[in-house]
Image: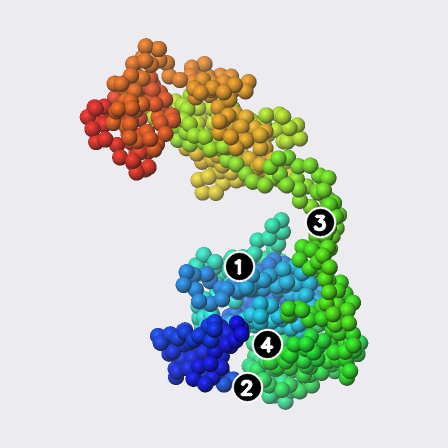
Amino acid sequence: MERCGCTYEGQYYHLGQMFYPKKQCNYSCICGNQGRVACNGRFSCSPNSHCRIRNGVQACHPVGKGSCSVSGSGTYQSYDGKQINVPGNCMYRMVEVIRTKDQKQIHFSVSVQQTSSHGKVIITRKVNIVVAAYNITLIPGLPWEIRVDQIRAVLPLVLQNGLVKVYQSGSFIILETSFGLRVTYDTVSTATVEIPSTYKKAVRGLCGNYNDKKEDDFLLPNGKQALSATQFVKGWTLVQEKVICKTGCGSKCPQPDKGSQTKVENDCKILIWEKGPFAKCHSKVSPKTFYDACAKDVASQLKDKTLLCRYIQKYVVSCQQAGVSINIWRNTTFCPMTCPANSHYELCADTCSSTCASLMMSHTCPVCLEGCQCDEGYVFDGGKCKPLSDCGCLVRGRYYKSGETSVLGNCIEACTCKSGQFSCKPMRCKEDQVCRKKDGIPSCVNDPCFKKTCRERERCVEKGNKPVCTPVSKASCRAFGDPHYETFDGSQFSFQGTCSYVLVKTSGNDKTLTPFSIINKNRLASGARGSYMKSAIIKLPGHEIVITHGERNKVTIDGKISSLPVKLNSGNITITKSGITGTLKTDFGLEVTFDWGEFFKVTVPSSYYKNVVGMCGTYNNDRSDDFVTPAGVRVPDVVQWAASWSVPDNDRTCWHFPACTEQEKQRYRGPEYCGVLVDKTGPFANCSKTVTLAQFPNDCLFYACLTRGSRTAYCKALNSYVNSCMLAKTPVSLQWKQITKCP
């Protein structure tokens, strides 16, 4: 009784069904639990839909549909009718729904992977559809089966109570959803994606934006119009990890063979003959675009003897889906179709109601398409025709062949269909095994990482059947301004010493890690600003790279000045520039980002966790030991600690702290100078409860010593702390300027 529906004005409705009992669909109702009906009297159909009665039920229906396709060597036709040619071997985003806050359309995406390209006789495409949290893949050369989340599934298939249906219709695989998406795939290279008009202006990709305007179909992901087809295609190319693809064909693009052009045109003319097998379809589906694409593409791909047939087949399916009957056009010498044992070719094949699954779940194809039909007494069991007695099992919308063992989930169950009975047993991989999917079938295989020991912040992954340790994260240390530092573990401090210091280097504890070191040289700036990073020396195995303040777009490598970009060790070290920023990258994960001025950042992979030392800290997720000397001693005084990381250079005048006698320091630490910051009854006492004083008193003392007690520098240091208090929304007594005599 809990699943029963509702009765409203003498009409029965299913639980969860939305219906429109009044005219013009301006009154919507939904059938809820326990037979209760909830109605909304302020309703109207969405744009590009209208109120119509279909199959005896009144509802909002789309006013039409749009069709986008890819075929041949790469001919895309958008929803608005624009055609482009897309050569290459990349994965392309064909169509996807634009995500918005008030989005009403169900989200989906369709992408295609061209799996064969230059030099291949037949160009094939794999189609990937993401809908309702399912990742569905249609694979060339595999009729009657697909992949759902990388798991093999035999057709027909029903997911989420009919939200998604995938079935074989003739020689095509068709995916349909309850919201109007339909993908038709010939299991070779042709795919057509149809969507209802309710998706107008709500989609993007190579299929365009579906707004009835060809001229703006070259819309890029950033919302701007591409200046060329090449730029447009590149914008919708999916970047795949460690996969290098080409979006064009350059000088190798196939050109129409002029000597064969006339013959090809004559062959393709079967599409437009007034007395040909498709004449009855011309008024319903114009053959012109099909003919033009056929004549152009086939003449450029003469080695592919099946391309002509697939172009004709594309038109045939368009006609049949439009409800037009087609005359026989294939024969034993022209585009013959080979069928498996116990089956034969039919122009109108019924591959939906003649399957093993249809015996347990009624299913008819919306229209019949040409393809192979099982002989009398046989039904489709996947791609083979078998007697009824050999049929398998249908379980929760999925069909399983008889006698086959199916592994479910992450190798947690092994299920078998036998004599129409589906039974499962729990399974578990051995300790030295892992569950892997091969050709869509999960199985337990030996785990190459079982005996592999990785570092603390690494994980083992399988690459080429070999175990490889890879970092799980990254950490960054940075220096900026005059200069301020932030360690790998997040400690912050300021230090204006003008000598050379070890910013970071490998500790040497793990000899298997690639060693490196970075030494920064500071210099005193003019005026009362303090110091700045003058240069950084990056020492890598075999190379010494120097980055110098102000020398933009250049670095010094092994004593020689080089302009960017630079590649070293066959690309194992690269130094590039983007805008005002330079970036050094290594094959072992070290990355240095800089602007030749105020900013310098070092990023290391987690392989170096607990294996670095220097002013960037120890990178061990513990801030308390960031300030340790090379001898491992913790030092609370930043100046003393930083001095321990200094290295000899040729600057005899450099200092770790400005020259200042103990008497002067005592004076500047007093209440008339920097002592006011730590005075518990002073004007800053309230702020010190929320904003940690940290380096502010030391900074104040530094500027006081540097400028011999200059009130300007002193007030600048106090202002810096006041600003920090303001950012923390903590008020500072308005009397602070009077007490400190700052303007």
C-alpha span from label 1 to label 2:
35 Å
C-alpha span from label 4 to label 1:
25 Å
Mark 1 or mark 2, earlier in chain? 1
Q: Residue furthest front?
A: 1
Mark 4 or mark 2, earlier in chain? 2
Instruction: Write down the residue under mark 1.
Output: 236
Secondary structure of residue under mark 4: helix
Circle 4 packing at 10 Å, graded few (<14), some (14-19), many (20+), is some
Scheme of image coloration: rainbow
**Which of the pair 82/483 is nearer the observer?**
483
Residue flagged by tag 1: what amino acid is it? Answer: Trp
C-alpha span from label 4 to label 2:
14 Å
Q: Is residue 427 above or below residue 40?
A: above
x and y percentages locating residue 343 in the rendered image: 77, 79
Instruction: Write down the residue under mark 2.
Output: 283
Query: Quadrant location of the C terminus?
Result: top left
Q: Are marks 2 and 3 in contact (CB under 8 Å)?
A: no
